[in-house]
Image (cartoon, helix red, strand yellow):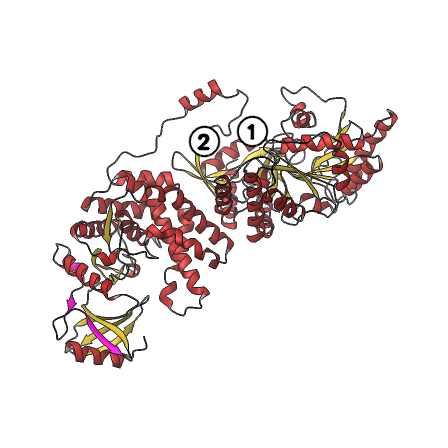
Amino acid sequence: MNFSEKDIEAFAKKYYQLDADAAMLNGYDELNCLLSDKSGKKYILKIATDEHGLHFLDAQIKIVNHLGKSAVGSKFQKYIVNTDGEELTTIIIEGKNYYLRILSFLEGSFWVDAKEKLDALYIDLGNFVGSMDKVLENFSHPAMHRHYTWDISTATDANAKMACIKNHERRRIAAYFLLQFEMEVLPVLSSLRHAYAHNDANDYNVLVQHNKVSGLIDFGDMVYTALINNLAVACTYAMLNNDNPLQAASLFVKGYHQAYPLIEQELDLLYYLVAARLCISVTQSAYNASLASNNAHHFITEKPAWDLLYQLIRINPVKAQHSFRIACGFKGVIDETDYTDLLQQRKEHIGRNLSISYNKKLKIVKGALQYLYDDKGKTFVDCVNNPSHVGHCHPVVVKRMQKQIAMLNTNTRYLNDNINEYAKRLTATLPASLSVCYFTNSGSEANDLAIRMSRHFTKQKDIIILDHAYHGTSTVAMEMSPYKFDGKGGIGKMPWIHKAINPDMYRGPYKYGDADAGKKYAADVQRIIQDLRVEGKSPAVFICETLLGVGGQIPLPPNYLKEVYQHVRAAGGVCIADEVQVGFGRVGDSFWGFELQEVVPDIVVIGKPIGNGHPLAAVVVTNEIADAFNNGMEYFNTFGGNPVSMATGLAVLDVIQQEEMQQHALEVGNYLMKGLKQLMEKHPIISDVRGHGLFIGAEMVKDRTTQEPAVAEIDLLVEMIKEKGYLLSTDGPLHNVLKIKPPMPFNKQNADELIQYLDEALSQF
């Protein structure tokens, strides 16, 4: 609409006998103008087109007139009638219809501009919105029954614009919340109370005077929708730019409930409805940006909306549900009793040696990317759950799994595109020689199969491993895991197992700064090979993690695997890279840990991150090994390679690559390592910081000279940091290494907070 202020003044004069000066105002899609007459009285003139619909404009007039007759009527504008006594004026210019309305002017500051918002103002806003909705109980208009972008009920439509969000982290968070909307809200949406709602009590539509709501403008977004949606919209904007958004929301809910009582079911959905409204907003802003919009109003809420989404994902939904219920006088959902009964049930029915982390136990009820929520309302940043590689409940992975399991899940005796596609995509990330896949359900099972294949290929039985290694829970995997067989309850080393020295450049004989450390540690493998040769034997296989996990979060010395592989292959053995803990871009510098050593293994074992926590693992081998293994005995795994697992694996690969997670791991990992090394300079108890990307260890000692492990101290530290909301764990043969292997969405803000809390805790030692 290309009307000038002079045109507007002429319209006001001609159709309303109003002699006034015009000044253009911002608007989302209608033309808005401020009129000021000679006496100083002000009005708002609005111009719409046929795009807005004559029938819908009639609904706006009727709803405002209806509200104007109520006890809250003074807080709404009044329509000024034209010279024909009508609220709506139609003008035709060059064959196109334009619809004019003039409304009274409401005094007050916009909510967004209110400098100080006392608690009473949030309650008053809720009370006002509740009072408005109560008045509209007996209002109706058919034009408000429409499918509308800004109706929270249609929030899933925002998925179509998700690709317009170019920032990976932001897109991931928005998609996560829309997934939760689908899971938590959509199944019950049709059963909720519905109403004719304003639907846009935003921070530029709510007016405030003297810490009271003085008015509400703009009915252009009104719609027939779930009643709680109208509350959710207003609540969303009340929460913006607030350091404690949950408190603000709870005050608002309290005020609303006083005016128009809510029910528990509605309150229990509010957290997800607020998130959904924000997702509509940010995807719409991103979409408008993709169209190169120059309308500032299209982006006015973009930054605070993103800020609130980042705040919201750190608010435990159980805590929000509890707070909203308490605000309305209902019984809360958080039970502060301990887990005595739950622990007793576990003791009765679950294996006794299945451990539980932390002195004060956690009951985790929900996950969100790098966050975990317990049943007490607390949020934790997960720093150790590396199987959830691309994040807990990553929306892309979840949806792919849902779609496939709703279609088909069977075994590999039938042809299926998923297994072929995944094998092709997986091997494309590996050296060309590693081209044949076998799929299993766990890293333990994959290691077991890899050893079986190696023994078949070499016709030998002996296995060379590293001291303190861990390769899984199957019988064969346990036999080659000193972490288990040398520990409490272990059965000791089998005769065919041979332990090479752990290539630890902090505690081992060859230290940091020794340029030949890798070669020297590798010599111990050669020693084992020579001892076997004396017995007339050769190794079937050498297996090690490409960064040592339970061995102490240890990166291998430069050239270590290059030397070892040369020794093993010269003796006729097979070289296995165990990538269960470190693969898929976690180390940042490369996609696979073995690439850090510039070697190509004969077999790669993959687990944990491959399915983002779904039971999926793989053994990838050369054609030569695969051909030898094809000896007439069928290899069949009931669940290995099933269509759901393959769809999951494909989704994980897509996410890693599309969201550039390897680069993210490099940048955030280096950032966190730098912070930890600064802590090491300040706190002598930290004696070594090591790792690559988001695979990091920090060793703690009582004394740097004696290197006495600080076991009691590190256990206490882990508990202290847990109370701050960060979940860590310990590792290493001496149980004194802080291990940090978070889901890949872990970000620099998380790193900063973790460093801060570690610093505060260590200062008490």
Residue 362: give its label.
2
Q: Residue 215, relative to residue 624: is it above or below?
A: below
Left or right of residue 573: residue 633: left
Identify the magenta region: 75-93
Closer-to-camera residue (358/462): 462
Asked where in the image residue 413 lies, by quadrant, the reply is top right
Q: Residue at x 49, y 49 (%)?
A: 749
Q: Crowding near pointer 2: few (<14 within 10 Å), some, many (20+)?
A: some
Q: Amino acid at mark 2?
A: Leu
Q: Position of residue 319 (x, y in %)?
A: 36, 39
Q: Crowding near pointer 1: few (<14 within 10 Å), some, many (20+)?
A: few
Q: Amino acid at mark 1?
A: Ala
Left or right of residue 174: residue 678: right
* Quarter of the rendering occupied by the N terminus: bottom left
Q: Is residue 185 visible?
A: no
Left or right of residue 592: residue 156: left
- The residue where tag 1 is placed is 712
Q: Position of residue 612 (x, y in %)?
A: 55, 40
- Say whether residue 514 is magenta: no
Closer-to-camera residue (459/669): 459
Q: Position of residue 416 (x, y in %)?
A: 59, 42
Q: Residue at x 55, y 46 (%)?
A: 651
Q: Is residue 751 visible?
A: yes
Judged from this view, the residue extending furthest toward the front is: 414
Asked where in the image residue 610 lies, by quadrant, the reply is top right
Q: Who comes first in sequence, dot 1 or dot 2?
A: 2
Label 2 secondary element: loop
Q: Residue 485, relative to residue 758: is it above or below?
A: above
Asked where in the image residue 145 lies, by quadrant, the reply is bottom left
Q: Position of residue 94 (x, y in %)?
A: 29, 80
